[in-house]
Image: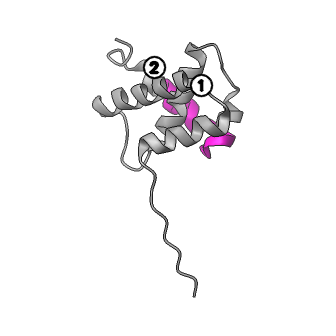
Amino acid sequence: VLNITMEELSPGELIQDMCQRGGFSRLIQAATIQIVKKAHMLGLVPAGNVETVAAAALLMASVAADQQKPVFEIAYLTGVGDHAIRQCLTKLLTESSFLA
């Protein structure tokens, strides 16, 4: 019997890993972390769904920094489905207080 346990990554480590794999700048990494923190503050991060919010935040930050990659590419490097990223992005963008 093979018994393997792995430590979970913190949201910051997760975002850092996503950004490194995608070749994103530190600016995008910092912006992604801020977006996830704000989403968490507003209660928009469901338990166990940090990866999806982080992937949507990465997309938002990359668009804002004019370094956008296609959704399917972000889905590939984050391991989150492109449909889930789009749904989460829509939810974040429709939160009026989120954009303030």
**Element carrying mark 1:** loop
Image quarter hosting the C terminus: top left
Evaluate whether residue 45 shows in this view. Answer: yes
The amino acid type found where label 1 is placed reads Ser
The spot of residue 2 in percent (x, y) is: 58, 83
Question: What is the number of the mark on residue 25?
Answer: 1
Question: What is the number of the mark on residue 91?
Answer: none
Residue plotted at (36% across, 29% down) = 39
Residue plotted at (55% across, 29% down) = 58
30 or 45, which is in the foreground? Answer: 30
Q: In the visual, does 63 lie left or right of 90? A: right
Q: Nearer the viewer, mark 1 or mark 2?
A: 1
Question: How far apart are the alpha carbons under marks 1 and 2?
Answer: 23 Å
* Circle 2 residue: 93
Which of the 4 image quadrants contains residue 68? top right
- Report if residue 83 lies within the magenta region: yes
Q: In the visual, does 63 lie left or right of 38? A: right
How many marks the image carries: the answer is 2
Q: Residues within 10 Å of mark 1 (few under 14, many from 20)?
A: few
Q: Which residues are magenta?
A: 75-90
**Which residue is outermost to the bottom?**
1
Which of the 4 image quadrants contains residue 36? top left
Q: Residues within 10 Å of mark 2 (few under 14, many from 20)?
A: few
Evaluate whether residue 60 shows in this view. Answer: no
Position of 46 relative to 93 (above/below): below
The amino acid type found where label 2 is placed reads Leu
